[in-house]
Image: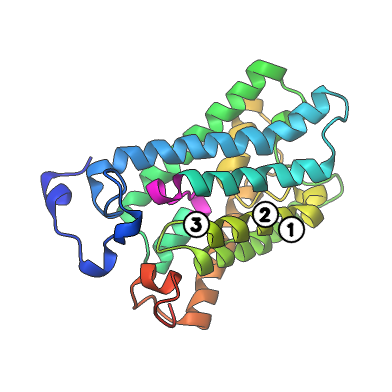
């Protein structure tokens, strides 16, 4: 819970929200007065993401093949794009523990805010998986991301690591500080998710998101190689942060201005 000191502490000028993006509840992303709104937004956004990402294979199994693989791949990408547009300015639309941790590693997001974000993301995933179970039963492995039969656990972990390194690199390159905002982030992130899924979904499910994987695993009790979908994305996100340091150096300049092309470097 934010203290009175957190709530009224002045925010440095370079971290303040541009006037064009300010609303009564998004003003000053670092002001904890409205942190509960951001936590709710992360829970809702992750619920919607998992509802589509896990729901597509569930409905495919329930309807005996009416949702082809390409639709299963594109649907969550489109959902992420929509979520970034409608709530990116509120919570940042992280929707993914690996993304929140990577933002913190990069220095764009305080570590003390990470646990609440990750908890909200996991709750949203659990709610989505529970909804799918209630609606369709435990079919299609409840949308769990599982390695293809004959594909080793370490291969799945490496694939998820590489995929997430690419995803977080795209996010760090297009986000405004610790937030996915606007057309650049929405289109680039959605495009990458669809692209990664088109080739990797048949072998690992192309999760790139521990929250997306853990909800269906826990509710559906499909525990096969689940940890590969936690370790792989988190390590991949850390690799992306290292790549960002190589490409752009430490985040010494105001991240909001850099993301808008107003300052060189990041």
Q: Left or right of 246: which side holds 110?
A: left
Q: Earlier in the sequence, mark 2 or mark 3?
A: 3
Instruction: Kindly identify the residue that appears in the image at 51 percent across and 39 percent down.
Output: 45
User: Residue 184, can we see it?
Assistant: yes
Identify the residue shown where x is 40% and y is 45%: 117
Task: Check the image and tell me how it is coloured.
Answer: rainbow
Label 1 packing within 10 angstroms: few (<14), some (14-19), many (20+): some
Compared with 60, 13 (above or below) is below
State the extent of the magenta-drawn residues as a range: 87-99
C-beta proximity under 8 Å, tags 1 and 2: yes
The residue lying toward the viewer, choosing from 150 and 240, is: 240
The residue where tag 3 is placed is 182
Residue 222: where, in percent of width, then height? 69, 32
State the CA–CA distance, disc 2 to disc 3. 17 Å
Instruction: Tell me the distance, in whole angstroms, between the alpha carbons under discs 3 and 1.
Output: 20 Å
Q: Residues within 10 Å of mark 3 (few under 14, many from 20)?
A: some
Instruction: Report the front residue among 135 and 28.
Output: 28
Q: Is residue 96 magenta?
A: yes
Q: Of the two numbered discs 3 and 1 on the same chain, state the one appearing first in sequence.
A: 3
Q: Nearer the viewer, residue 155 or 103?
A: 103
Number of marks: 3
> Residue 192's quadrant in the figure?
bottom right
Was residue 153 drawn as part of the magenta stretch in this picture? no
Mark 2, residue position = 193
Label 1 belongs to which residue? 195
Q: Quadrant of the C terminus?
A: bottom left
Q: Secondary structure at mark 1?
A: helix
Rounded to the nearest angstrom, the CA distance separating label 1 from label 2 is 6 Å
């Amino acid at each position: 819970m934010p203290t009175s000191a957190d709530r009224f502490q002045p925010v440095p000028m370079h971290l303040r929200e541009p006037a064009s993006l300010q609303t009564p509840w998004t003003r000053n992303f670092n002001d904890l007065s409205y942190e509960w709104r951001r936590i709710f937004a992360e829970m809702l956004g992750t619920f919607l993401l998992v509802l589509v990402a896990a729901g597509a294979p569930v409905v495919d199994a329930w309807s005996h093949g009416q949702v082809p693989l390409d639709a299963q791949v594109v649907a969550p990408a489109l959902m992420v794009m929509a979520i970034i547009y409608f709530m990116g300015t509120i919570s940042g639309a992280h929707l993914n523990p690996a993304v929140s941790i990577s933002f913190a590693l990069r220095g764009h997001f305080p570590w003390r805010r990470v646990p609440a974000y990750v908890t909200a993301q996991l709750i949203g995933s659990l709610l989505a998986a529970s909804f799918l179970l209630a609606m369709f039963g435990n079919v299609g492995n409840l949308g769990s991301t599982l390695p293809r039969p004959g594909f080793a656990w370490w291969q799945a972990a490496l694939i998820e690591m590489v995929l997430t390194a690419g995803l977080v690199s795209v996010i760090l390159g297009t986000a405004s500080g610790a937030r996915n905002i606007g057309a650049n982030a929405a289109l680039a992130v959605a495009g990458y998710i669809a692209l990664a899924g088109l080739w990797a979904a048949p072998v690992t499910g192309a999760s790139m998101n521990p929250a997306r994987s853990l909800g269906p695993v826990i509710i559906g009790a499909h525990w096969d190689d689940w940890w590969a979908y936690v370790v792989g994305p988190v390590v991949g996100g850390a690799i992306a942060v290292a790549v960002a340091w190589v490409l752009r150096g430490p985040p010494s300049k105001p991240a909001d201005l850099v993301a808008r092309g107003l300052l060189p470097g990041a």
